[in-house]
C-alpha cells in the first residue's frame, strides 16, 4: 500500500486537520502544513516522485517516532507510515512537529 502513496494524496489534506493513529493505538489530532516534492532525489526506474509531508499536533504529545496509520483520500487507511519528530525551532514547544519522507 505504501508504494501507492503519491504527493497528490496529501495535496487534498494540505492546510486541513486530520488524525494520526500512533503505534500504541492512540489517536493524535494533527494539522498538515507542508508538502514538498523533491524531483532531484528520484531513484532511477522509480515510478514515484519523492516528496515529504510536514505537520504538527494540535495538542501536547510525547510521541517521537514510529510506524503510524493515516486516512488518505482515494487510498483509505494506510498503515506503516514512518513518522519522525522534528525540533520546534521557535514554534510552540508544547506541540509536536513531524515529518514523513516518501522516496
Image (cartoon, rainbow, N blue to C red):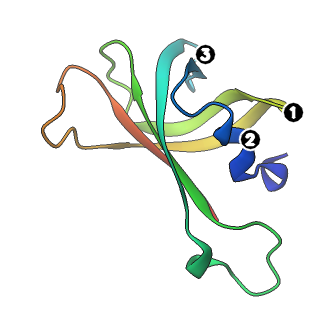
Q: Earlier in the sequence, mark 2 or mark 1?
A: 2
Quarter of the image where one finds residue 41 = bottom right
Q: Earlier in the sequence, mark 3 or mark 1?
A: 3
- Residue at horizontal 32%, vertical 28%? 96
Q: In which quarter of the image is the C terminus?
A: bottom right
Pointer 2: what residue?
9
- Residue at horizontal 17%, vertical 27%? 93
Circle 2 SS class: helix
* Numbered disc in front, either 3 or 2: 2
Contact? badges 2 and 1 (CB < 8 Å): yes
Q: In which quarter of the image is the N terminus?
A: top right
Circle 3 SS class: loop
The location of residue 14, given as percent across then percent down, is 56, 34
Q: How crowded is mark 3: few (under 14 residues within 10 Å), some or many (20 or more)?
A: few
Residue 73 vertical position relative to residue 25 in the rendered view, above or below: below
Residue 54 vertical position relative to residue 32 in the rendered view, above or below: below
* Numbered disc in front, either 3 or 1: 1
The location of residue 73, given as percent across then percent down, is 79, 30
- Residue at horizontal 18%, vertical 32%? 91
Is 65 on the left-hand or right-hand side of 12? left
Seen as rendered, the residue at the extreme bottom is 44
Q: Which mark is residue 74?
A: 1
Contact? badges 3 and 2 (CB < 8 Å): no
Q: Earlier in the sequence, mark 3 or mark 2?
A: 2
Quarter of the image where one finds residue 16 = top right
Pointer 3: what residue?
25
The location of residue 2, given as percent across then percent down, is 78, 49
Circle 1 SS class: loop
The location of residue 47, given as percent across then percent down, is 83, 71
Amino acid at each position: 500500500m505504501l508504494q501507492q502513496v503519491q504527493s497528490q494524496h496529501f495535496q487534498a489534506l494540505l492546510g486541513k486537520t486530520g488524525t494520526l493513529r500512533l503505534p500504541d493505538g492512540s489517536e493524535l489530532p494533527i494539522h498538515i502544513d507542508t508538502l514538498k516534492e523533491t524531483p532531484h532525489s528520484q531513484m532511477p526506474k522509480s515510478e514515484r516522485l519523492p516528496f515529504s509531508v510536514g505537520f504538527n499536533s494540535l495538542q501536547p504529545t510525547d510521541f517521537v517516532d514510529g510506524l503510524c496509520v493515516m486516512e488518505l483520500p482515494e487510498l483509505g487507511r494506510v498503515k506503516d507510515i514512518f513518522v519522525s519528530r522534528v525540533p520546534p525551532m521557535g514554534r510552540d514547544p508544547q506541540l509536536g512537529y513531524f515529518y514523513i519522507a516518501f522516496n
